[in-house]
């Protein structure tokens, strides 16, 4: 029994990070109507920037390196929008999609150029997990869940309790109408990019703290996040949250029944089925409610 | 355009003619070697080791009086470059013997070409077990990974573990090695409590670790690489799994120890090795220092040296320069041949056997395991 409980716990840990990525991805989709393929690279950059700061010549302690790294990640996110997507925003959505694939290659290969393709680590000694009721969880993993709860809670507050959040939802609902109503589009798009890159960067750092860093880490997680977005219905923030958790739990619990080698197969098979049976995601009925 | 084409073809004929002429008073062997690209750091060393052996062959009379030469073709460290390199060596130069490229994937890309054209291909650094199935014209002076499967099985047996969990990387290499391990281990009376493949290149192996932990085995055989091995060891430590990890040579690297951050302590594994106490090895070391003073001996340099020496011996004994005659002579030459890297007797697959050493991690450093 504890075996299954541990699998579910592992699923929640993985899922909370997927959810962080998926929420950012779906917010960008909600406002700008395109899937930002370079989202994964924000994940990797968040992680690598911390690595840059904790090593010479900076040699900053880890906890102090996180904030500046996240600020730079946000700058990269905003820069993507300012210099690549904004000039193309009035064109075809496909143009934006292709541009984002280009940005993704550029950012990923910049990582390769600076740090190489090899696996890196923050060099923190592993610690034994905390044991309770037969379950094991490491302090990093507690931090992962905590961060996800904190960031998503803050997002909930922002979207429901503040004018900025409400205008964000309005823009997601109908961009033109929102603009006519006098909503400041610049402010809204800046907020979306800042939040998306913050979530990606923070998730990327936690993921690297928990495991390792490699240039492809963004890409792999971006695909999971994309799946979570589809599952929750594109543009639906809470759908993406549930989708992320769902994928995390499904692929971890699936290990009990299939070989772990087929972990990815489980989550993607589920998406496949859902797309056929419920093309609008699990929350298809609630379309429009964001 | 057409004119240029004719001109080029003309040049090709001219050059091939020149080589054919040259072939009458010297013996030339082709080599596809990574001289540029990501493997270039190793390629230079391979080349130097081959040239050292070549010097020795020519100093002692060459191939029945004719000097031996190696024509190096760069492959840019890629499979694509290897294929065009070997095609050039076969189609234009028509060499009967070619030294294959480093890295198993590059070697596997060229071996069907050599086999189809009935050209002898010899490898000095490629370990993949799939190379054994390349065909009758393909040889290796480097031990196949297949032997390692047996090596790990013997290690497990010798350490007294009768019941283990087996996990392996889900690719040709991992699955092949696991098969060999299983066969040998079960034959020795061992029992597998659980076995499963794990994916390459993941960062989260916690579910796999849990599956191992469920059985609480005394030992786990993990046939994997550096990254995967390090991640699994680290996560096993975090999960509180106490077991003896047994591994192969692909994870034997200081990088693995560094990535695992202390969790690699006490791992035991096997690796193919050869004695550094033999007169052959000492002679090689001396010759190297003389030809390349102050230069460190390159990785796999000994194997490249042996490859050239053995090929020269085969060419001397061959009835003619036809690939079939050379092939027969190579098998004969290998029989009982003791080179720098040990016995080079070829088996039916063109592979050699190897002796296996044992490594362990102690105090954050990789060293030899002693009971």
Image (cartoon, coloured by chain):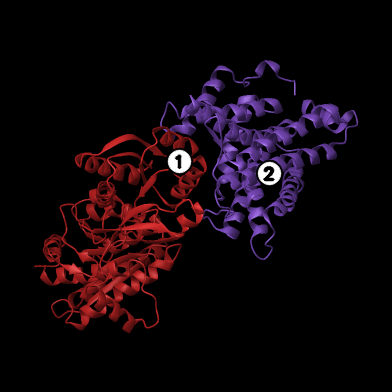
- Chain identifier of the purple chain: A
Percent x, y for residue B331? 13, 61
Q: Name the image quarter holding the N terminus of chain B.
A: bottom left
Q: Quadrant of residue B296?
A: bottom left
Q: Looking at the image, which residue is at 47% across and 43% down?
A: B236
Would residue A162 appear left or right of B36 to someone viewing this image? Answer: right
Of the residues tagged 1 and 2, which is closer to the observer?
1
Name the chain letter of the residue that bears numbered label 2. A
Question: Dot 1 surroundings within 10 Å: few (below 14), some, or many (20 or more)?
Answer: some
Tell which chain the image draws in red: B
Tell me the residue that label 2 is attached to. A202
Task: Identify which residue is drawn at 54% across, 28% down.
Answer: A8
Q: Seen in the image, is A169 located left or right of residue A99? A: right
Q: Chain of mark 1?
A: B
Q: Secondary structure at mark 2?
A: helix
For the residues marked 1 and 2, what is the alpha-carbon distance in whole angstroms? 29 Å
Q: As rendered, which of B135 and A89 lies closer to the eye?
A: B135
B2 shown above or below B184: below
């Amino acid at each position: 029994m504890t075996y299954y409980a541990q699998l579910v716990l592992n699923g929640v840990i993985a899922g909370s990070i997927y959810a962080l990525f998926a929420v950012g991805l779906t917010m960008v989709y909600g406002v700008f109507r395109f899937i930002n393929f370079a989202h994964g690279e924000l994940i990797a950059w968040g992680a690598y920037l911390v690595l840059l700061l904790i090593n010479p010549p900076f040699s900053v302690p880890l906890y102090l390196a996180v904030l500046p790294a996240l600020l730079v990640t946000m700058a990269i996110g905003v820069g993507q929008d300012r210099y690549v997507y904004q000039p193309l925003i009035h064109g075809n959505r496909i143009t934006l999609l292709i541009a984002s694939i280009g940005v993704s290659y550029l950012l990923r290969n910049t990582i390769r150029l600076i740090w190489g393709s090899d696996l890196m680590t923050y060099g923190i000694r592993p610690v034994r997990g905390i044991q309770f009721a037969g379950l094991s969880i490491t302090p990093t993993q507690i931090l992962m869940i905590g961060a996800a709860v904190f960031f998503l809670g803050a997002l909930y507050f922002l979207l429901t309790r503040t004018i900025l959040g409400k205008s964000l939802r309005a823009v997601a609902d109908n961009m033109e109408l929102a603009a006519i109503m006098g909503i400041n589009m610049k402010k809204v798009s800046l907020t979306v990019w800042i939040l998306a890159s913050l979530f990606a960067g923070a998730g990327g750092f936690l993921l690297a703290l928990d495991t390792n860093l490699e240039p492809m880490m963004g890409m792999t997680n971006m695909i999971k996040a994309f799946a979570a977005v589809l599952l929750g219905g594109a543009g639906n923030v809470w759908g993406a949250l549930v989708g992320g958790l769902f994928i995390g739990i499904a692929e971890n619990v699936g290990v009990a029944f299939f070989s772990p080698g087929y972990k990815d197969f489980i989550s993607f098979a589920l998406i496949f089925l859902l797309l056929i049976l419920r093309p609008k995601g699990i929350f298809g009925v609630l379309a429009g409610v964001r | 355009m057409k004119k240029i084409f004719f001109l080029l073809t003309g040049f090709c004929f001219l050059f091939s003619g020149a080589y054919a002429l040259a072939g009458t008073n010297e013996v030339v062997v082709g080599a596809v070697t990574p001289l540029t690209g990501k493997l270039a750091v190793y390629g230079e060393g391979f080349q130097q080791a081959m040239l050292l052996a070549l010097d020795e062959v020519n100093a002692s009379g060459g191939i029945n009086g004719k000097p031996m030469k190696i024509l190096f073709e760069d492959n840019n460290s890629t499979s694509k470059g290897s294929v065009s390199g070997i095609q050039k060596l076969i189609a234009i130069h028509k060499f009967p013997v070619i030294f294959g490229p480093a890295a198993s994937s590059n070697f596997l890309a060229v071996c069907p070409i050599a086999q189809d054209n009935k050209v002898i291909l010899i490898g000095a650094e490629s370990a993949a077990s799939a190379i054994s199935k390349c065909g009758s014209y393909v040889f290796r002076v480097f031990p196949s990974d297949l032997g390692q499967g047996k090596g790990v099985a013997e290690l497990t047996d010798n350490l007294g573990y009768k019941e283990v969990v087996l996990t392996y990387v889900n690719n040709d290499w991992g699955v092949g090695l696991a098969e060999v391990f299983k066969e040998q281990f079960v034959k020795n009376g061992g029992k597998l409590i659980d076995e499963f493949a794990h994916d390459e290149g993941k960062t989260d192996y916690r579910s796999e670790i849990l599956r191992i932990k469920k059985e609480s085995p005394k030992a786990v055989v993990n046939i994997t690489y550096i990254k995967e091995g390090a991640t699994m060891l680290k996560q096993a430590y975090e999960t509180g799994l106490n077991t003896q990890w047994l591994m192969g040579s692909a994870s034997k690297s200081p990088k693995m120890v560094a990535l695992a951050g202390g969790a690699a302590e006490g791992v035991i594994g096997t690796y193919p090795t050869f004695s550094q106490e033999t007169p052959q090895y000492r002679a090689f070391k001396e010759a190297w220092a003389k030809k390349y003073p102050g230069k460190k001996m390159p990785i796999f340099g000994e194997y490249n040296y042996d490859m050239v020496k053995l090929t020269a011996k085969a060419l001397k004994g061959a009835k003619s320069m036809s690939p079939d005659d050379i092939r027969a002579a190579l098998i004969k030459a290998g029989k009982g041949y003791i080179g720098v890297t040990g016995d080079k007797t070829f088996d039916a697959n063109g592979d050699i056997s190897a002796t296996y050493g044992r490594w362990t991690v102690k105090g954050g450093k990789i060293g030899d395991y002693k009971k």
